[in-house]
Amino acid sequence: MLIEDAVYGDREIEEEVLKELIDSTPFQRLKNIHQAGPQPFFMDKYPMTRYEHSLGVMLLLRDHGASLEEQIAGLLHDVPHTAFSHMVDFVYDTDEHDYHDRFLEKIVKQSEIPEILERHGLDVDYILDEENFGLLERDAPDLCADRIDYFLRDSKRYGDWKIDHFVDSLTTIEGMFVLDDKELATEYGKKYAEADEEWWANPKEVVLTEIFAEAVKEALEQDVLTEEELFGTDEEVMEKLRNSSNELIQEKLELLDNGFEIELEAENPDMEVTTKARAVDPPVTVDGEVRKASEFSDELREKIEEHEEFVKSGYSVNIKEK
């Protein structure tokens, strides 16, 4: 199986278990789950999918010598995402944007995935426990495959930031990702915070997600949608909303369809929204030791602190319809 990846290039996959998992129904569903949530339906944003990202995480782990089990864990880590990705965290007000993590075991175990893994002599419970895999997931602000891939993937689409240089500088020590270039590590930390401000925690995009989440919340409360249907595709959920006769749902969709502008720091805001702050302080090897990039850069340390304070304080906005 040939995988043509925009970030890491072409890779040939020979392991039968990986090929079967990639072809499985739960994994193929990710082709229809947008990484950015509802934004591609309402604004000019590249429709990157959870499918692309999950393959990328697996390839990154593979390139750095991760075990087959960790590659599989990386491949499957986003299978339980609902339609529109982290939009559901706005529906259920999960501060850490981890709603989908609660369903990893349930969604995976009710699919054909356990049978595939068991047939190849692999332990399902071990693979589903991300604590077993330090390259795949680590607490922020450390580097991990999940965090690295979505930054590089968005950078490729929107900025093409030194991706090749970064990938060449990336290595592993004692089961964790580190960089071998102090200056690059510092720049990466700053660029990551800037990416959060411009892409993932951008105020207008957060407001768009909140408005859409209000429509979904109304749909759930009025039995237009069931929670189970949230585990369909983006298009399936959108069709249910579009076809609804509920006035509030249609009002929210019309606002998003027509477009809007926002005014930040409003005194009497129409809406107050919060989102998760994302930042990394990359580990870097210096004279044989692994240290945080912020130890060498006051600018990076201050950037991370200011960014986290700005995002965590939330946004008070007025909404102006077009």
Image (cartoon, rainbow, N blue to C red):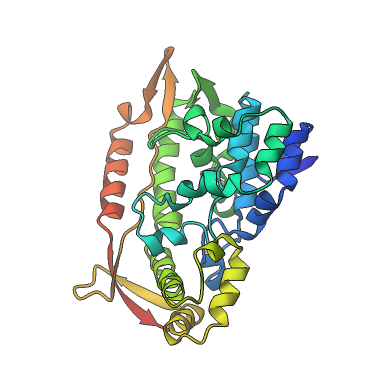
Instruction: Give the residue displayed 42% in from the left and 49% down from the top.
Output: 98
The image quadrant of residue 315 is bottom left
Question: Which residue is pictured at 44% across the width and 50% down the height?
Answer: 195
Q: Is residue 55 left or right of residue 270?
A: right
Q: Quadrant of residue 30?
A: bottom right
In the rendered image, residue 97, in percent from the top left (x then y), is placed at 40, 52
Q: Residue furthest left?
A: 267
Task: Find residue 169 and report its horizontal and vertical position in percent.
Answer: 55, 27
- Is residue 268 toward the left or the right of residue 5 in the image? left
Looking at the rendered image, the quarter that the C terminus falls into is: bottom left
Q: Is residue 81 above or below residue 217?
A: above
Q: Quadrant of the N terminus?
A: top right
Specify the farthest residue to the top.
288
Q: Is residue 134 visible?
A: no
Q: Residue at x 43, y 66 (%)?
A: 209
Asked if residue 184 shows in the view, the reply is: yes
Residue 112 placement (x, y as % from top left): 69, 46
52 sits left or right of 172 in the view: right
Give percent across and percent down for residue 75: 62, 40
**Location of residue 185 with respect to 86 vertically, above or below:** above
Q: Looking at the image, which is closer to me, 289 or 274?
A: 274
Residue shown at 41% from the left, 58% from the top: 89
- How many discs mark residues in the rendered view? 0
14 and 245: which is toward the camera: 245
